[in-house]
Amino acid sequence: MKRRTFFSLSAMGSASLLFAKSKTNTARQYQGSGIKVIATWNVPNAVDAALEQLNQSASALDAIEAGCRVEESDISNSSVGKGGLPDREGRVTLDACIMDAQGNAGSVVFLEEIEHPISVARRVMENSPHVILAGEGAQQFALEQGFEKTNLLTESSKAAWEKWLETAQYKPIINIENHDTIGMLAIDNSGNISGGCTTSGLAYKMRGRVGDSPIIGSGLFIDNEVGGATATGMGEEILKSVGSFLIVELMRQGMHPQQACEEAVRRIAKKGGDRVKDFQAGFVALRKDGETGGFAIHPGFNYTIGDSKGKTLLTPKTLL
Ligand code: SD4
């Protein structure tokens, strides 16, 4: 059964109540802004792919999938998809999630040997009754959906892992250690917003480790009444503050996306205590009216914005 059909049966009864509630809970209704894309890090090719879709009047969801797929196939990006750095046993394991304007969500965690986890996440959302599929089951579902197995460990990622094995010390280093996870948010011609987040996670993580990126609310959150937010950085820290959901809720209460990102980063830093000097966490946010924000704990973070006029790379101020 298609996920939407599955939901419509149970949700119809309460639809009018939900609508009434959401109207009173939303401080402002944001008007459309024209097409817009925002993505963590310097990812011009991914943003171009998303803009190409939006310029052809595709949905924000299609734009997100297209944009994220670019980074997943780029073997020079060692923290996403093919070419991602492996876990400490030398195996590349991928996490991704996607959300659409209707609030539907799909996610895959600990997925191996499939190049496009963002597309599998979309299939989980659209073609399964679930939100998250993990590991072997996620791979089995992907194969059933027509995806093919592929070797994700490139020669250079393998060489980097072998070098790491010489000391096998696990200490993530801010920005240097494997940070290029792509979190992307997009608004389409109809004014609808969607988002996605895809990563190979932290390099040399323990086998089975899952970070924030595929977890709805932590690595990504979308609410079509308000906007969206997505994260990059140390998943263990971002998870504990459910940062992306927090940003969307702060925007709902009237905060500008920039202030909302700053507040989420402050909360993570506060919880981190002394450890904060050793980890990075950054967010980008996009409000329904096209206003954007971006903030991180440490310098080194940047993000890419695209709209009908072109692309810009922004380097925000940071907390420390
Ligand atoms: C994780 N948040 O797995 C991801 C890592 C990341 O850029 O953002 N890398 O914790």
Image (tube, helix red, strand yellow):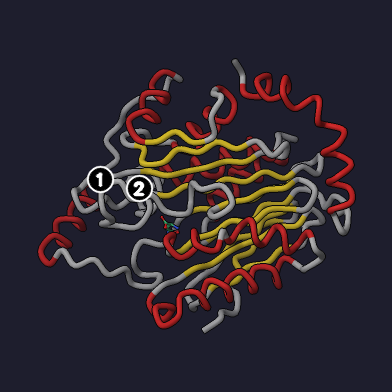
Q: Quadrant of residue 172?
A: bottom left
Q: Residues within 10 Å of mark 2 (few under 14, many from 20)?
A: some
Q: Is residue 305 left or right of residue 212?
A: right
Q: Is residue 173 left or right of residue 287?
A: left
Q: Are discs 1 and 2 less than 8 Å apart at CB?
A: yes
Task: Identify residue type, mark 2.
Answer: Ile
Q: Is residue 220 left or right of residue 209?
A: right
What is the distance, in whole Å, between disc 1 and disc 2 at their CAs? 7 Å
Residue at the spot x=45%, y=71% of the render? 280
Can you tell which mark lies on residue 75? 2
Residue at the spot x=35%, y=47% of the render? 75
Residue 186 drawn above or below residue 235: above
Q: Is mark 1 within 8 Å of ligand 1?
A: no
Q: Nearer the viewer, residue 56 or 293?
A: 293
Q: Which residue bears the numbered disc 1?
A: 154
Q: Quadrant of residue 203?
A: bottom left
Q: Is residue 141 left or right of residue 228?
A: left
Residue at the spot x=60%, y=71% of the render? 295
